[in-house]
Structure formats: structure tokens, C-alpha cells
């Protein structure tokens, strides 16, 4: 397989907020003492009067952002996913989601690919914590190109948004001309025997690698980029169930409560088919390189291929 270009989604996030901030003076950015890592320092340098470093005070950051939103501002709150929503879920629940304020949450360093920082900094439960809240939209851009579109959508759509992204460079799998719409999935490859549904660029690339190997065995894999975790593209999921008859979900998150769980809810209610789940199996993260951790947690292409073979044995 040809190796694609790799880019940082967090850099695309920072640069896009700066670009949009040039014409939309209502955009403000708040960070919790991690501006260099989340790349919001770029916004602070460009527009210092609209940037607020709140320090290690995530609850204050969310409450302040909600207040700013009531005055017509469009606040972006950025820190690591273990802290956002981990340390400020109550403020998000009441001041952002219940109040339906126009606050955008940027949760960086999601998944085990954070690497050597280890369990304390690897956000593996954030989607589960957030998708149960009414009014929130959860987007997990698969690459830098999609991140730019997701930030634009967040600015142009009223209401609570969460952007989830990782630390490492990820392969660019989408094109500028690909249409991005909140609540709509993108088919990266057509297939007829099984559907792989991935969230995040690193694991989606592993899906592509697995599909290439499985093709040698005569197995045809449809691959879907499910960038919007909430609201889900139910039509794409049901269509995949009816046309391929088997689903394997793949994510850098706990299987319990994550994207796979959300997809299973759609499948069981509309078009039940066999499913397998690639993700973290009820354990905390560990330190290591992203490649080592993908192997340790069973997220790499060989494990995805094994899951496909397993689910096909259950397919009627």
C-alpha cells in the first residue's frame, strides 16, 4: 500500500481557528495551560486580546466559556481529553449542554497513540462520557483535511460541539473536494462482504492495510470513516448491514460506551447482523510508542483482519 502524507490534526485545528478568527471577531479561545501542545498558542499570538490561558483550572475554563457564549462569543476550549471532559464534566453537562450554549470543546491527545505519556494522559473514556449528554455534537476528524472542515462546521453551527483528536501525525485519507457534513459518514472504500467502520486516521489506515491483505483471500471490505460520533449516520450503518451483512468497528477508545457501542445500538434496533469490536478492552493505557501500543491493545491491521475472519464465520 502506498504510504500517504502524514500531518498533525492538532496543528490543523490551531491554524484553522486562526484563519477563521481573522474574519469572525466573535471567536475566542480558552486553554488550560497546554496552549503549545493543543496549538492554540497560534491563536494567542495572532489575537492576544481574544485568547485566555485559564491555567490548570478546567472547570473555570468551561464556566467562563459558557458565560462568554451568552454574550454572542464563540468560545473554543482546549486541553487534553483526559481533562476535558474528565475534570469538568459537571460544568459541561449544566453550563454547556443543558443550557445549550455555543461552546466548542477541543479534546486533544485522544487514544493510546498519545504514546509514552501513558495511562494518565491517554483519553480512552471521553466519547463514552460525552455521547450520553443531550445537545452535544461529537466529531472525530480522521485527518488534517477533515479537521479544517470540522472546525468550520463547529463555527457555523450553533450549539455545543466536541472535537476529538490525537497527538501524533496521522495519514491524510480524505481530499479537499470530499464533502464534509455533520452526521454523515464517508465511504473510503467499497466492499461487499463486510464493513469496517473506523474513527480516527491511525486506525482507519490500519483498516485499509487489513482490507488489502484480506483482498488476497477474496474478502471484500467496505471501509467507512465515521467522523461524526454524534449524531451518527444511521442510514450509512443500516445500508452497510443490509449490503454486507457484517460489521467490525475500530476505534482508539474503550469498546464499552464508545463509537462501537453507539453503532451497535443502531444495528440491533434496525438491521441486526454479526459485529466485532476493535478497541480497548476494559483496561487503562500504558507507556510505549504508538506502534507498540497498537500491537499491545490489539488495534493494528492483523487484529482487524482476525476480527473480520471471525465475524464472517458468524455471518448467515
Image (cartoon, rainbow, N blue to C red):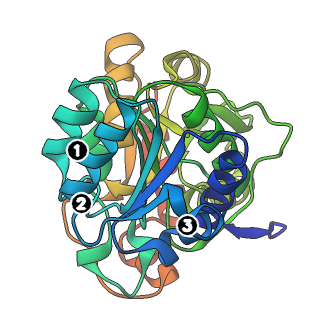
Helix, strand or loop for disc 3: helix
Of tags 2 and 1, the one toward the viewer is 2
Residue 45 vs 198, above or below: the answer is below
- The disc, 1 or 3, on the residue closer to the chain's N-terminal end is 3
Q: Residue furthest front?
A: 49
Q: How many numbered circles are shown?
A: 3
Q: Position of residue 252 (x, y in %)?
A: 41, 59
Disc 2/disc 1 C-alpha distance (Å): 16 Å
Question: Which residue is rendered at x = 21% and y = 35% of the image?
Answer: 95
Residue carrying label 2: 58
Residue 165 spot, x, y in % from top left: 50, 58
Q: Residue at x 36, y 70 (%)?
A: 297
**Residue 268 place in picture, x, y as percent:** 32, 19
Residue 143 showing in the rendered view:
no
Q: Which mark is residue 236?
A: none
Choose the circle earlier in sequence order: 2 or 3. 3
Q: Are marks 1 and 3 in contact (CB under 8 Å)?
A: no
What residue is shown with label 3?
A: 44
What whole-number distance in Å separates the C-alpha atoms at marks 1 and 3? 29 Å
Callout 2: few (<14), some (14-19), or many (20+) C-alpha neighbours within 10 Å?
A: many
Residue at 42%, 67% (x, y): give it. Answer: 109
> Split into 4 quadrants, where in the image is the N terminus?
bottom right
Label 2 or label 3, whichever lies nearer to me, is 3
Query: Which label's residue is closer to the chain start, 2 or 1?
Result: 2
Query: Which numbered circle lies on residue 129?
Result: 1
Residue, far top? 270
Q: Position of residue 18 (x, y in %)?
A: 66, 56
Q: Are marks 2 and 1 in contact (CB under 8 Å)?
A: no
Of badges 1 and 3, the one in the foreground is 3
Identify the residue at image location x=27%, y=30%: 97
Amino acid at each position: 500500500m502506498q504510504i500517504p502524507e502524514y500531518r498533525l490534526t492538532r496543528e490543523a485545528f490551531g491554524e484553522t481557528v486562526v484563519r477563521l478568527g481573522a474574519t469572525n471577531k466573535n471567536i475566542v479561545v480558552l486553554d488550560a495551560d497546554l496552549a503549545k501542545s493543543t496549538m492554540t498558542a497560534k491563536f494567542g499570538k495572532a489575537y492576544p486580546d481574544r485568547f485566555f490561558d485559564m491555567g490548570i483550572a478546567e472547570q473555570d475554563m468551561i464556566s467562563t466559556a459558557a458565560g462568554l457564549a451568552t454574550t454572542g462569543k464563540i468560545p473554543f476550549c482546549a486541553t487534553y481529553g483526559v481533562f476535558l471532559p474528565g475534570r469538568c464534566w459537571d460544568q459541561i453537562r449544566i453550563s454547556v449542554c443543558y443550557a445549550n450554549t455555543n461552546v466548542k470543546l477541543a479534546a486533544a491527545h485522544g487514544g493510546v497513540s498519545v504514546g509514552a505519556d501513558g495511562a494518565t494522559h491517554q483519553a480512552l473514556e471521553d466519547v463514552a462520557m460525552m455521547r450520553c449528554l443531550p445537545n452535544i455534537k461529537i466529531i472525530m476528524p480522521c485527518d488534517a483535511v477533515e479537521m479544517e472542515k470540522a472546525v468550520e462546521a463547529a463555527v457555523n453551527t450553533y450549539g455545543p460541539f466536541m472535537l476529538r483528536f490525537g497527538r501524533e501525525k496521522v495519514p491524510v485519507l480524505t481530499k479537499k473536494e470530499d464533502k464534509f457534513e455533520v452526521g454523515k459518514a464517508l465511504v473510503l472504500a467499497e466492499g461487499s462482504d463486510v464493513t469496517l467502520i473506523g474513527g480516527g486516521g491511525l486506525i482507519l489506515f490500519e483498516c485499509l492495510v487489513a482490507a488489502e491483505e484480506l483482498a488476497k483471500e477474496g474478502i471484500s471490505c467496505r471501509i467507512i470513516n465515521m467522523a461524526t460520533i454524534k449524531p451518527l449516520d444511521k442510514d450509512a450503518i443500516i445500508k452497510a448491514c443490509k449490503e454486507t451483512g457484517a460489521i467490525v468497528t475500530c476505534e482508539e477508545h474503550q469498546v464499552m460506551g464508545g463509537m462501537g457501542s453507539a453503532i451497535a445500538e443502531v444495528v440491533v434496533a434496525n438491521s441486526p447482523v454479526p459485529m466485532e469490536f476493535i478497541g480497548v478492552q476494559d483496561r487503562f493505557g500504558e507507556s510505549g510508542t504508538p506502534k507498540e501500543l497498537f500491537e499491545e491493545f490489539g488495534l493494528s491491521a492483523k487484529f482487524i483482519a482476525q476480527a473480520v475472519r471471525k465475524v464472517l464465520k458468524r455471518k448467515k
